[in-house]
Image: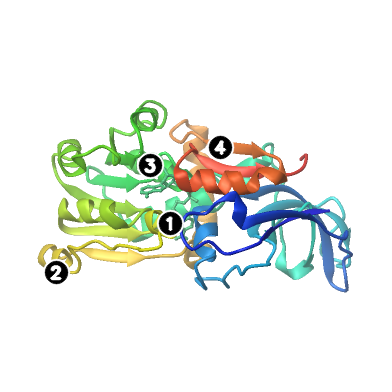
Amino acid sequence: NRQIIVSQLPQGTLTEDHFALQDAEMPVAGEGEVLLRTILMSIDAANRSWMQGATYRDAVKAGDVMATYSICEVMASNSPKIAIGDIVAAESVWADYVTRPARAVQKLPKVDTLSNLISVYGIAGKTAFHGLVSVGNPMAGETVVVSAAAGSVGGYVGQIAKALGCHVVGIAGGPEKCKWVVDELGFDACVDYREKGLFKALRAACPNGIDVYFDNVGGPVLETTVALMNERGRIACCGAISQYDSANPTGPRNLPGALVVKRLRMEGFIVMDFAKDDNKAIRALQTWVANGQIKVTEDIVEGLENAPKALIGLLAGDNKGKRMVRVGAD
Ligand code: NDP
């Protein structure tokens, strides 16, 4: 049973030296527990923020097996509610096998493509749907801007906003990604934040200003979008990936001034806040996938041993769509 521990906590940029692969005993399911074989592990920007301290969950500490959200097969069960062979989702760790209390795992429906339960019908799609619809509240004809637009959450945000009839502009790193966001995901435009002149480029792409900004990155990109927001605009704060790897986090300088003058609403959210609406989100996403308005984009890295590289690469922007690691066969 292989597992990957966080051997030391990063102070700045995360590197492979912060992780170590080790062999551990095969775990045995105790009373009320299940033994799980990991199939897929979600790789999320938030994984890095867990190393910065307690957030909406406990911090990951040096010496811990790295935490993750996984899809697993049940190999042994000491619960009448979960059977051997069931496919479940679990808050888990970077390991081939783990045990969990049976009440803490969630049985998954039978689907053709298991990875879709991590991407479009998983945290990524649900975060995009709830954050855009319930926090951003866009109207048809309004302009929606989303950062990390080629990433998993951002890609779905833009596609949902298009399906709702909005003018949609992405922000992403590099010309190739920006082209992909327009050509593959169908955004109206996408601007490259790594180029000089983001303000001008974004202003040109949003001739009517910005009504809704879905913020995945924080920092200087947030500062620029705030400067282009229309009166009574909404900013849905989903994450701040530009700050997770930074030893000196920087916030936008135009807050709270611009919020006051433009009567903006800026609201953070965590996807779990909207769990009661998950079925509604899934049904809407299924409809858009079926009629071709949403493309499912997945970026699957093979092998548990490549999980550190997969997370480091995600933070550096080398993914397109939802990144995950395949640990074992479906
Ligand atoms: P993504 O698939 O979006 O990948 C992250 C992307 O962020 C990279 O591909 C990279 O793309 C971009 N990025 C990296 N560094 C910077 C930077 N300095 N400035 C701007 N962009 C950068 O990851 P996730 O879908 O896992 O996460 C996206 C966001 O959603 C994160 O902020 C995460 O914390 C948040 N999140 C929030 C949830 C909630 O409940 N609130 C739930 C799930 C995710 P590029 O090449 O364009 O730079």
Side (left or right) of 45 relative to 149: right
Between label 3 and label 1, give the one nearer the viewer. Answer: 3
Dot 2 amino acid type: Val
Q: Which mark identifies residue 38?
A: none
SS for callout 3: loop
Q: Position of residue 36 (x, y in %)?
A: 80, 56
Between label 2 and label 1, give the one nearer the viewer. Answer: 2
Q: Which residue is mark 3?
A: 149
Dot 1 amino acid type: His
SS for callout 2: helix
What residue is at 44 percent from the left and 57 percent from the top?
A: 245
- First in sequence, mark 2 or 3: give its number: 3
Q: Categorize mark 4 by other alpha carbons within 10 Å: few (<14), some (14-19), many (20+).
A: some
Q: Is mark 1 within 8 Å of ligand 1?
A: no
- First in sequence, mark 4 or 2: give its number: 2
Q: Is mark 3 within 8 Å of ligand 1?
A: yes
Quote the CA–CA distance across marks 4 and 3. 14 Å
In this picture the colour scheme is: rainbow
Q: Is mark 4 within 8 Å of ligand 1?
A: no
What residue is at 14 percent from the left and 63 percent from the top?
A: 258
**Residue 210 versus residue 160: which sits nearer the camera?**
210
Quote the CA–CA distance across marks 3 and 1. 16 Å
> Residue 88's image quarter?
bottom right
Q: Is residue 284 visible?
A: no
Q: Which residue is mark 2?
A: 260
